[in-house]
Amino acid sequence: MSGFGESKYLRHIILIWATKMSELKRILVVDDDASIRDAVCEYLDEHGFSANQAKNVTEMETHLRTGVFNLIILDYM
């Protein structure tokens, strides 16, 4: 995964707080930038998580109506 740690991604903060990382299996990544969504999901998938993507609030709401997520990562800008 190239570019994930580059400075252009520093505006994005991912906070994961859990006593056991193994409990965080389903993660929803919400960001309007497709390259960031792809990079974060690729990283999570490579580390054993099931990551889904949403590009906006409407897609996020659809995911939340149809599934259960342990964590949601949001774009803060």
Image (tube, rainbow, N blue to C red):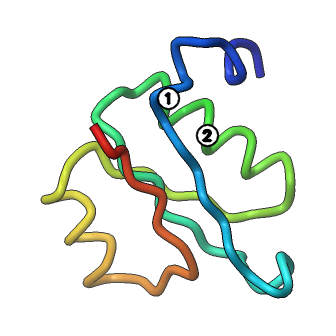
> For this rendering, which residue is in front, 69 or 16?
16
What residue is shown at x 84% (from left), y 46% (from top)? 46
The image quadrant of residue 5 is: top right
What residue is shown at x 27% (from left), y 63% (from top)? 60
> From mark 2 to mark 1, how far is it between C-alphas?
6 Å
On the picture, is 14 further left or further right than 66? right
On the picture, is 60 further left or further right than 70? left
Residue 50, position in %: x, y? Answer: 67, 64
- Badge 1 crowding class, 10 Å Cα cut-off, few under 14, some 14 to 19, many 20 or more, is some
On the picture, is 21 further left or further right than 4? right
Asked if 67 appears above or below 41 in the picture, the reply is: below
Residue at image mark 1: 36
Residue at image mark 2: 40
Secondary structure beneath dot 1 equals: helix
Mark 2 and mark 1 residues within 8 Å of each other at the beta carbon: yes
Task: Give amino acid for label 2.
Answer: Val
| Rendered-image quadrant of the C terminus | top left
Residue 39, position in %: x, y? Answer: 61, 30
